């Protein structure tokens, strides 16, 4: 079940209940329930966890434990732009930590977080499959390699500029 982007903020208990009932929770299918909720909303809202707990009898603490244990789940909505920072061996040896710190400074979010303005979510990944270009990041599905802190600053400024253009287009 995928909910239209514009309607994603509006949580519907009916949607959550339908997802919870569709899976046979007694047979241990709680992960598919959480996956489908994330698919619908882009993250697993804490209020949805509470609702699933009431519906299924699985304690909310257990559900929170699952969501925080598995890297695939998010408890916060995604920002408009997704930055994946590679920490695989080649990128690690080529200064991935420095890249991470620079990204944190320029977008205002650490790995695993979304910036206050909602523009960026930063995620940590193991390998982007472009090791010869290390250090690498992926921005909205596009890989950028042989990065320097200066290049990151430029890249983020370009994304911010694009967002401004989109916003002014929406207003006008
Ligand atoms: S280790 Fe970074 S792309 Fe492979």
Image: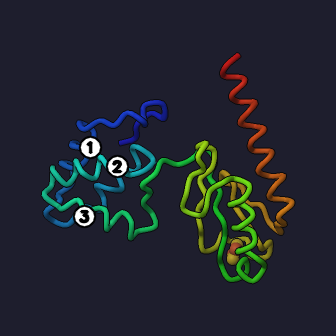
Residue that mark 1 sits on: 16
Q: Residues within 10 Å of mark 3 (few under 14, many from 20)?
A: few
Q: Separation of disc 3 and disc 2 at Cα? A: 17 Å
Q: Which residue is mark 2?
A: 37
User: Label 3, on which residue?
Assistant: 61
Q: Residue 82: horizontal and vertical position, in percent? A: 62, 52
The mark tally for this picture is: 3
Q: Quadrant of ligand 1?
A: bottom right
Identify which residue, 132 or 50, lies in the foreground.
50
Say which of marks 3 and 2 sits in front: 3
Distance from disc 2 to disc 1, alpha carbons, whole Å, reads 7 Å
> Which of the two labelled residues, at mark 2 and mark 1, occupies the earlier sequence position?
1
In which quadrant of the rendered image does the C terminus lie? top right
User: How busy is the neighbourhood of tag 1: few (under 14 within 10 Å), some, or many (20 plus)?
Assistant: many
Marker disc for residue 55: none
In this rendering, would 122 be left or right of 52? right
Residue in the picture at 77% in, 72% down: 135
Compared to residue 12, the image places residue 70 above or below, namely: below
């Amino acid at each position: 079940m995928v909910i239209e982007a514009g309607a994603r903020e509006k949580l519907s208990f009916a949607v959550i209940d339908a997802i919870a009932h569709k899976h046979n929770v007694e047979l241990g299918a709680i992960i598919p329930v959480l996956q489908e909720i994330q698919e619908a909303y882009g993250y697993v809202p804490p209020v949805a966890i509470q609702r699933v707990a009431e519906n299924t009898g699985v304690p909310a603490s257990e559900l929170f434990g699952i969501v925080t244990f598995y890297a695939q789940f998010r408890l916060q909505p995604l920002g408009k732009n997704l930055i994946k920072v590679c920490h695989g061996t080649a990128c690690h040896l080529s200064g991935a930590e420095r890249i991470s710190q620079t990204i944190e400074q320029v977008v205002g979010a650490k790995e695993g977080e979304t910036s206050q303005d909602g523009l960026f979510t930063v995620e940590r990944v193991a390998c982007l499959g472009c090791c010869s270009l290390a250090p690498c990041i992926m921005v909205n599905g596009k890989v950028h390699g042989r990065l320097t802190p200066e290049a990151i600053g430029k890249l983020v400024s370009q994304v911010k500029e694009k967002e401004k253009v989109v916003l002014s287009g929406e207003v006008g």
